[in-house]
Image (cartoon, rainbow, N blue to C red):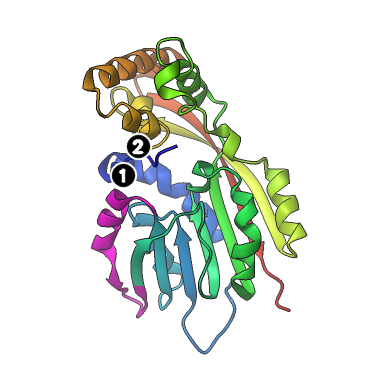
Amino acid sequence: MPVPTWDPQQYLRHTSHRIRPFHDLVARIPELPAHDRPARIADLGCGPGNVTALLAERWPDARITGLDNSPEMLAKASELAGPTPGGGHLEFRHGDARNWVPEESYDLIVSNAALQWVRGHDASFPDWISALTPGGTFALQIPGNFTSPSHALLGELCDSPQWRERLHDRGRRFVHILQPADYLERLVELGCEADVWETTYVQLLAGEDAVLEWVKGTALRPVLTALADDPAAREEFVAQYRELLGKAYPTSPHGTVFPFRRIFAVARKAER
């Protein structure tokens, strides 16, 4: 399946909601190994770089590399590249989570809301854990809401007679994630001390077509990319999806309630 075309500005429309799970993930990461050098950190699937930059707040002098396979996201992230206030350095370069193998050692490899796009991503865990320094950490956060109405309705619409031939399985992404217990088992099998949990954030979104605007930045991207050469079809699909979402997520005077489940894992490599 082709890589979706990303829109950094659309993705960043709900920044406060999108970065909250990242803060919760970073808060559970233990202290990194002590060296006579700054910490070395990789952010796999860094997107527009806004959360990558937050890593410099926890580890001010770290050398941090954000990796992504989207030219659009990397172009936006590059605006943040350079020295950090604490004496560290932030850089961004191309890297694809589907086949990334670290070429150097890291004290922390983190991936935030990215691995759900990669079928069988747990097969890469051995390479990523191997690249950690002793006592280093691998941490991930992924959406776990692929059976919720926002995603189930998208999958059903893509699979309807009108759209099935053109869109195939572009609306069905839930097959790419594991359940929390499965992540725990795989990470423990690799010799890590693992902390795995899940949280459902009950988000209140503001504005008209709030849930549609949310998924335009994420789950809907493969569909929008597939229909990019046919504006009329793209508009028709979005209109049909808007109607379905409006029924599933009614608005109130306070906004639109949008529950969002997230899965987290923090795995610390043995020091020896």
**Which percent across, then down, holds residue 88?**
37, 77
Q: Residue 174 carries which label?
A: none
On the image, which quarter does residue 93 sit in?
Answer: bottom left
Which segment did they paint magenta? 69-89
Q: Nearer the viewer, mark 2 or mark 1?
A: 2
Instruction: Determine crowd level at label 2: few under 14, some 14-19, many 20+ residues with C-alpha closer than 10 A.
Output: some
- Residue 253 located within the stretch drawn in magenta: no
Q: How far apart are marks 2 and 1 (CA)?
A: 8 Å
Q: How many marks?
A: 2
Q: Is mark 2 on a helix, strand or loop?
A: loop
**Residue 61 position (above or below residue 42):** below
Classify 231 as above or below 135. above
Is residue 249 visible from the viewing direction of this image? no
Which residue is denoted by mark 1 in the rendering? 12
Specify the amino acid type for callout 1: Leu
**Tags 2 and 1 touching, CB below 8 Å:** yes
Furthest-top residue in view? 161
Q: Where is residue 242 in the image (x, y as percent from the top left)?
A: 35, 17
Front position in the image: 258 or 105: 105
Q: In which quarter of the image is the C terminus?
A: bottom right
Q: Residue at x 32, y 33 (%)?
A: 225
Q: In which quarter of the image is the N terminus?
A: top left
Q: Position of residue 131 (x, y in %)?
A: 59, 71
Q: Is mark 1 on a helix, strand or loop?
A: helix
In front here: 95 or 194? 95
Task: Check disc 2 and report the residue beneath it.
Answer: 217
Extreme residue toward the bottom, this view: 36
Residue at position x 44%, y 26% from top?
Answer: 257
Q: Which of marks 2 and 1 is nearer the N terminus?
A: 1
Q: In this view, does 70 lie to the left or right of 266?
A: left
Q: Is residue 162 above or below residue 26?
A: above
